[in-house]
Image (cartoon, rainbow, N blue to C red):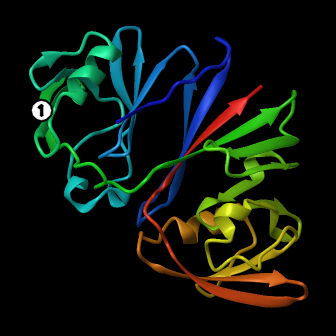
Amino acid sequence: MKRLFILFAVALMVHVLVDCASAAEPERKSLSIKATDGVVMIDELGAVLIYKDGTLSVQYPGEAGSRPEKYREVDLKEGDQLLMINGSKITTLDRFESNYEIIEAGSDVKLGIRRDGDMMIITFPKAEEGELPEKRMMMVTMEGDSDSDISITELDGSDHVVIGAEAEEIVPLIELGLILSETEHGLEVSDVMPNLRDATNAKEIVKGDRLVSINDIKITSSDEYGDVFDSLKPGDEVQFVFSHEGKNVGFTHIKKENQFKIIKQSH
């Protein structure tokens, strides 16, 4: 479980951006979080919880398909209020965290929740050390009064790019280390994160290259990208084709489990 310390001004609005995949209708969600809110994650579920006005509630329950298999059936929903953890009443965020921490790995975590006025208990095993895939954090910072200057940083400091584009046009293809922007020519690479890109088959791709297709489906916009890429499951083979120096360059990539959480900060 990770506590997200948001050290911004009181009036600052922070957005945790998460991609939600649905076989029927892919959807991209944005969660608005004030800097004064307490934020915590349940790593096993990929869930984001917010502590506000004395209440700990679920803002994002985590995408079931991106969880490890044994956590995919855990019934946590957006808006659930957490009241108890293993028989102990949740009165503060620190109390929730301290009670969570003392649960031994492999033992059951039992959360008493209120949903639409009904009380219920959900149970899942606390993960063993090293059992969960590593989560990496990215921050997207909007500079000035407009969205024209955007900085994307991996929070461990390994990569940093600054790009000029509207926020709505940005498509962070983080697992390939590529930042795409929607232009009149399609989705073009605005910048690259070399440490991430060079560890993949996308190492030839550079700024200015254009995404042509995914799995033989032509891609010309961020919506088309989302429809195709979000519908794929972790472990699926993905065939990318980019236009690079006047010719098409294709490569294969295995889609990863959801390894990244993106925090978006507006100045």
The image position of residue 199, as x and y in percent, is 62, 71
Quadrant holding the C terminus = top right
Quadrant holding the N terminus = top left
Q: Farthest residue toward the bottom?
A: 247
Q: Residue at x 23, y 47 (%)?
A: 127
Tell me: residue 74, above or below residue 92. below
Q: Residue at x 54, y 13 (%)?
A: 36
Task: Specify whether residue 129 is in view.
Answer: yes
Tell me: residue 34, above or below residue 155. above
Q: Is 4 or 61 nearer to us in this picture?
A: 4
Q: Is 104 or 148 nearer to us in this picture?
A: 104
- At numbered mark 1, what does the secondary structure look like: helix, strand or loop? strand
The image position of residue 203, as x and y in percent, is 72, 76
Q: Quadrant of residue 52?
A: top left
Q: Residue at x 24, y 62 (%)?
A: 69
Task: Specify whether residue 177 is in view.
Answer: no
Q: How many marks?
A: 1
Three-letter amino acid code at the position of disc 1: Ile
Whether residue 153 sits left or right of residue 260 in the image: it is: right
Q: Residue at x 80, y 66 (%)?
A: 189
Which residue in the protein does label 1 denote? 121
Q: Is 80 or 67 nearer to us in this picture?
A: 67
Tell me: residue 129, above or below residue 22. above
Whether residue 75 sits left or right of residue 92 in the image: it is: left
Q: Quadrant of residue 147?
A: top right
The image position of residue 117, as x and y in percent, is 20, 21
Whether residue 15 sits left or right of residue 222 in the image: it is: left
